[in-house]
């Protein structure tokens, strides 16, 4: 449970809002024939593959969008977790190497 809470805290409110919208839209798309038909009319000029595989394509698109949305941690907790992950590796850069690579001239 602590791992799940830490992961949730590592994301900011925008990430959760966008994720909620993606999930809500996917549920609405899959459960409402009227919405599915309306969106299908928007893709009338596209190849037959898009119209025939519409639900599958929508589910795949929603899954990829959700994954990409949660792949990045924008909160302070997420940045700190990523820094700790990097520091735990045997070839982690030293502070001097980071400073040398990021110093503006």
Image: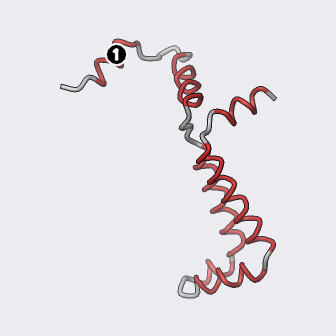
The residue positioned 23% from the left and 26% from the top of the image is 104
Which of the 4 image quarters holds residue 38?
bottom right
Q: Position of residue 29 (x, y in %)?
A: 73, 71
Query: Residue at 62% across / 38% down in the picture?
Result: 11
Left or right, 75 with reference to 53: left
In this rendered view, identify the residue nearer to me: 74 or 44. 74
Q: In which quarter of the image is residue 57?
A: bottom right
Numbered-mark total: 1
The residue lying at 65 percent from left, 82 percent from top is: 40
**Split into 4 quadrants, where in the image is the N terminus?**
top right
Asked if residue 11 is positioned above or below residue 29 in the image, the reply reads above
Residue for badge 1: 97
Q: Is residue 28 left or right of residue 95?
A: right
* Position of the C terminus by quadrant: top left
Taking the spot 77% from the left edge, 70% from the top edge, the residue there is: 30
19 vs 93, nearest the viewer: 19
Q: Residues within 10 Å of mark 1 (few under 14, many from 20)?
A: few
Asked which secondary structure carries label 1, the reply is helix
Q: Where is residue 39 in the image (x, y as percent from the top left)?
A: 64, 80
């Amino acid at each position: 449970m602590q791992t799940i809470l830490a992961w949730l805290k590592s994301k900011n409110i925008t990430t959760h809002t966008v994720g909620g919208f993606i999930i809500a839209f996917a549920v609405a798309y899959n459960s409402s024939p009227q919405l599915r038909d309306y969106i299908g009319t928007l893709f009338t000029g596209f190849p037959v593959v898009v119209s025939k595989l519409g639900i599958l394509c929508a589910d795949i698109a929603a899954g990829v969008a959700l994954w990409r949305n949660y792949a990045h941690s924008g909160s302070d907790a997420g940045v700190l977790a990523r820094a700790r992950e990097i520091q735990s590796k045997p070839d982690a850069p030293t502070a001097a190497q980071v400073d040398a690579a990021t110093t503006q001239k």
